């Protein structure tokens, strides 16, 4: 059992996501940084169970009531196991009574904690990912207890040698494709969009708001599909980039779409950070 | 009815979008539903989701896909598509309250001209709407059927809070907010009936293709309905449904 002594700033349970319900307006949710998510699973050698804990900006303080192994990936937080500093991306053995403290994030903002047992979290519409109002909670609260399955099925953690590539945490360049409404914009805007750096105004799991100096005429389009990484532009020049909890349809023109790795880079950025876009045109896209 | 020349394709990450012009009327929607279903069955193993909107069908692939191949296959599917309409869709009657607190967006839009607000609402109430699809937020219904003269463009920038139950107009679209949310549409009233309840299976009672008519209730009745729902009691104003 894991006892949540202090939940931190915004700590939730996530898995790969709640696919198959977009037709009811339900976002897919799931871990924001897919690279860190995948890395946690590889390091533990786990393929089947995909539930882990996502921490944001300031992590939680957790007391473990049974022994287990775990791995921490994503942003490096100030992390202590019984007050001794530990680092990310290494399988750590914990004993009953151990206290894991994750505090201020140092590079990036989202950190993942994955243990070598299946956490018992109710699956709603096929997923354990927290998302209100589909799940009763949006984030972990103080004094919550998380239980895990106590069976022989605890994962065999082999000390796998996996090369960890964390340099994306320090990148601020987002690889993008042209969105369906890209051509609606003026050439000068399209050009500046690719060369300039822009500041993040705010962020959460629903998405990122980014300020640009561009004003554009309101383009009345009917609401259409949006998915994680879709970049919409409002007439006042704010870019809205959908996150994993982002809305499934929207009415502002979809100017760009983030490539998969770019979403992991963005998920580690906070308000005030700057980002830029780099156009990646796949040959297939051109011919469409 | 749609023909091949109506369609174009675009791509959004691993999602293939089939674009076509929006057309009012039951025929167009039946076509979209049939084509969506056919494509869902055809690409079942490769898909995460299939959705549609007023003017698109969206195939959310699990990974990379070959747009040329799929493009061709979809056109092939169109030739053999048969639309049969055998289901009779119900008309749901939903209560809506137009107390001042719910019509302030409309009041601002008409620069404080109460007469214009009243005329707008009168015309709005005469129309019958059709639930075209769910999107935006869990259980947010997009309704078609708004007449041209009732179109109100979206706000230039979204506001921070549009309250739960808000009946709102965004360009030619009508929607009901299932929860408090930021929103860019003009609120014209409030509907106290929850459109979606995730403790129920299925969570929605109004299906795509169903008809909707609104009837006006007072603020007192709105409070009664909200209270009845909270206490899980019935109320004569809840769930009035008729079939044509």
Image (cartoon, coloured by chain):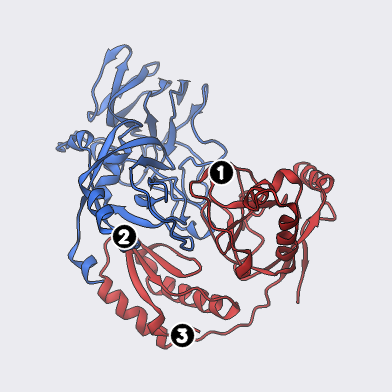
Discs 1 and 2 lie in a common subunit = no
Q: Is residue A241 above or below residue B205?
A: above
Question: Of residues B146 and A75, which is closer to you in this image?
Answer: B146
Q: Is residue A250 left or right of residue A49?
A: right
Q: Is residue B21 above or below residue A174?
A: below
| Disc 2 + disc 3, Cβ < 8 Å | no
Q: Is residue B198 left or right of residue A194?
A: right
Residue A274 position in % (x across, y down) = 27, 35
Residue A7 position in % (x across, y down) = 46, 23
Q: Colour of chain A?
A: blue
Precedes in sequence: disc 1 or disc 3: 3
User: The N terminus of chain A appears in which quarter of the rendering?
Assistant: top left
Q: Residue at x 65, y 78 (%)?
A: B87
Q: Residue at x 76, y 47 (%)?
A: B99
Mark seen at residue B181: 1
Residue A217 position in % (x across, y down) = 41, 56
Mark seen at residue B81: 3
Question: Circle 3 — which element?
Answer: loop
Give the Cα distance between marks 2 and 3.
Answer: 32 Å
Q: Residue at x 41, y 74 (%)?
A: B39
Residue A94 position in % (x across, y down) = 32, 21
Q: Is residue B87 above or below residue B152?
A: below
Give the Cα distance between marks 1 and 2.
Answer: 27 Å
Question: Circle 1 — which element?
Answer: strand
| Disc 1 + disc 3, Cβ < 8 Å | no
Q: Is residue B123 left or right of residue A287?
A: right
Crowding around mark 1 (Cα neighbors within 10 Å: few <14, some 14 to 19, many 20+) is some
């Amino acid at each position: 059992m894991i006892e949540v002594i202090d939940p931190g700033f915004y700590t939730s349970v996530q898995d790969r996501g709640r696919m198959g319900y977009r037709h009811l307006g339900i976002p897919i949710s799931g871990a924001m940084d897919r690279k860190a998510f995948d890395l946690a699973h590889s390091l533990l050698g786990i393929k089947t169970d995909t539930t882990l804990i996502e921490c944001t900006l300031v992590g939680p303080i957790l007391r473990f009531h049974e022994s287990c192994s775990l791995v921490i990936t994503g942003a490096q937080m100030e992390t202590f196991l019984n007050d001794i500093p530990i680092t990310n991306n290494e399988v750590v053995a914990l004993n009953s009574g151990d206290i894991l403290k994750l505090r201020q994030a140092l590079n990036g903002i989202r950190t993942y904690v994955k243990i070598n047992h299946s956490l018992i979290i109710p699956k709603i519409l096929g997923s354990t990912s927290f998302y209100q109002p589909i799940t009763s909670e949006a984030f972990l609260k103080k004094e919550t207890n998380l239980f895990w399955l106590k069976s022989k099925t605890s994962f065999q953690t082999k000390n796998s040698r996996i090369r960890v590539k964390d340099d994306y945490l320090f990148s601020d360049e987002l690889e993008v494709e042209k969105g369906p409404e890209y051509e609606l914009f003026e050439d000068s805007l399209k050009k500046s969009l690719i060369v300039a750096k822009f500041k993040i105004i705010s962020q959460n799991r629903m998405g990122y708001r980014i300020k640009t100096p561009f004003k554009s005429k309101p383009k009345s389009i009917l609401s259409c599909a949006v998915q994680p990484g879709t970049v919409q532009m409002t007439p006042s020049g704010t870019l809205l980039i959908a996150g994993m909890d982002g809305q499934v349809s929207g009415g502002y023109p979809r100017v760009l779409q983030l490539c998969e790795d770019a979403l992991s880079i963005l998920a580690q950025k906070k308000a005030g950070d700057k980002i830029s876009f780099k156009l990646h045109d796949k040959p297939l896209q051109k011919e469409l | 009815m749609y023909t091949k020349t109506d369609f174009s394709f675009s791509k959004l990450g691993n999602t293939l979008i089939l674009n076509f012009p929006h057309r009012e009327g039951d025929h167009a929607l039946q076509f979209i539903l049939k084509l969506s279903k056919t494509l869902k069955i055809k690409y079942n193993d490769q898909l995460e989701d299939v959705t549609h909107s007023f003017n698109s069908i969206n195939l959310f692939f699990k990974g990379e896909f070959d747009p040329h191949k799929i493009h061709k296959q979809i056109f092939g599917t169109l030739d053999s598509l048969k639309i049969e309409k055998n289901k009779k869709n119900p008309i749901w009657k939903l209560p809506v309250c137009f107390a001042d607190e719910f019509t302030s967006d409309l009041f601002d839009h008409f620069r404080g001209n109460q007469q214009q607000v009243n005329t707008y609402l009168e015309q709005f109430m005469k129309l019958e709407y059709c639930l075209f699809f769910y999107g935006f937020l869990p259980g947010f219904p997009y309704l078609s059927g708004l007449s041209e003269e009732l179109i109100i463009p979206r706000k230039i920038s979204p506001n921070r809070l549009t309250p739960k139950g808000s009946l709102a107009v965004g360009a030619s679209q009508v929607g009901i907010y299932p929860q408090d949310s930021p929103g860019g549409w003009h609120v014209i009233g409030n509907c106290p009936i929850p459109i979606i309840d995730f403790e129920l299976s299925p969570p929605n009672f109004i299906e795509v293709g169903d008809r909707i008519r609104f009837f006006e209730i007072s603020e007192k009745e709105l409070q009664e309905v909200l209270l009845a729902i909270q206490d899980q009691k019935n109320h004569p104003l809840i769930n009035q449904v008729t079939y044509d």
